[in-house]
Image (cartoon, rainbow, N blue to C red):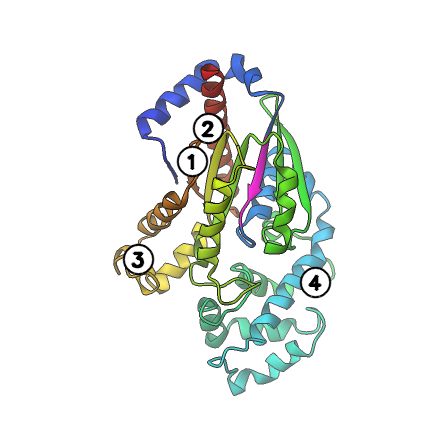
Amino acid sequence: MFLCTRSSTDATKKSNLIDREIKGDKKKVGDTIKLLLLGPGDAGKSTFLKQLNLLHTEGNEISNRNNYIRILQDNCFHSMRLLLQCSHPDFKIPPELENDANKILNANDLNSVVSSIEVLAKSEFITNIFSSRGYYKLQIPCVSEYYWSNASRFAQHDFIPTTEDIMRSRVKTSGIQTVDFLVERLKFTIIDVGGQRSERRKWLHCFDNVTAIIFLTALDEYDMVLEEDDEISRLSESLSLWSEVTASHYFQPLVWILFLNKSDSLKKKIEQNSLHKYFDDISEEDGKNQDKCVEYFHKQYTEKYNGVNPFYTYTTCALDTKNCRKVFDAIYRSILAEALQNVSLT
């Protein structure tokens, strides 16, 4: 599903226009379409980049699967360890879990504590803490349950990561990552930079000749705080950043694209607690409806948009390859449509 600031009639006209002119007029766009991925940390930029590798470069990024063995093992071990190190005053490990918890807290890697992770992961205590990780100010990823349920497999001596494993692996982006590929003989360059505050100064080096900017935000982080500052909510940080970059004279893309990402994790959260619990301007009923919740967040980003050129909004799940393929195809058409219109006006 995706939302667009254009009307459906306009979108249909644009689509028909591209169908008629795409073959002969792609040269008007230029030799390369340059896409810049921006957004706060943990929004899913690196995952989306891995999906594009899988879809358009024959999986070059994941060709050497052995590189991800240690990453996934560390993801599994450290996510549980971080949870157990929670300093919130309401956090207290039950006596029956203390032995397994202490084993993990005193260990250095996954291999020696697989059984303890499995015991904890199946407990009601850990399940409840994880589902309320925003309340406890825990900085653990939404895919942690996936790691814990696969702890035994990750620790096997002959473990080879699957594509699904690799898509869920997490390494904090530092510096600038790029991917190049061709779509219908048109070259795309995708640039991903770290979203943490310390990495944003590097964004200025990526502005030249940007065709479109894709800004990602995580729908499921409305109740969470920043890793860098636990007094600031991730949603408010994302909205402020979106407002700032779309207003900046440094950013002059042909198209702005907003990804409301992690729709799958949002669905799980609102099934347990209505969004109304956190925002009183959405009803209890609507706060449990995924489409209504997406509309709610979409409205907030629309109100904060300060750009001049049009922007398109897509509801995404970067872990879903089919969803990413559909969204990228739509982006491709949107960019070409705006490029053709821009050329016709000059």
In the rendered image, residue 198, in percent from the top left (x then y), is placed at 63, 55
Sequence-wise, which precedes: disc 4 or disc 2? 4
Identified by mark 1, the residue type is Tyr
Image spot of residue 199 (x, y percent): 64, 51
Residue sitting at the far top: 24
The residue at the point 44 percent across, 14 percent down is 20
Is the N terminus in the top left, top right, bottom left or bottom right quadrant?
top left
Which of discs 3 and 1 lies nearer the camera? The answer is 1
**Residue beneath disc 2:** 334
The residue identified by callout 3 is: 287
Query: Label 4, on which residue?
Result: 156
Residue 105: quadrant of the picture: bottom right
Residue at 35% in and 60% down: 271
Q: Is residue 320 left or right of residue 176?
A: left
Between circles 3 and 4, the one closer to the viewer is 3
Residue 333 pos. (x, y %): 47, 26
**Residue matched to label 1:** 312
122 left or right of 205 in image:
left
Q: Is residue 83 above or below residue 98?
A: above
Q: CA distance from mark 3 to mark 1?
A: 24 Å
Q: Position of residue 342 (x, y in %)?
A: 47, 20
| Residue drawn where x is 48% and y is 55% of the image | 237
Numbered marks: total: 4
Q: Earlier in the sequence, mark 3 or mark 4?
A: 4
290 magenta-colored: no
The amino acid type, in three-letter code, at marker 4 is Gln
Residue that sits furthest to the bottom in the current view:
95
State the extent of the magenta-drawn residues as a range. Answer: 34-39
Q: Are marks 1 and 2 in contact (CB under 8 Å)?
A: yes
Q: Amino acid at mark 2?
A: Ser
Between marks 3 and 4, how big is the CA–CA gap? 42 Å
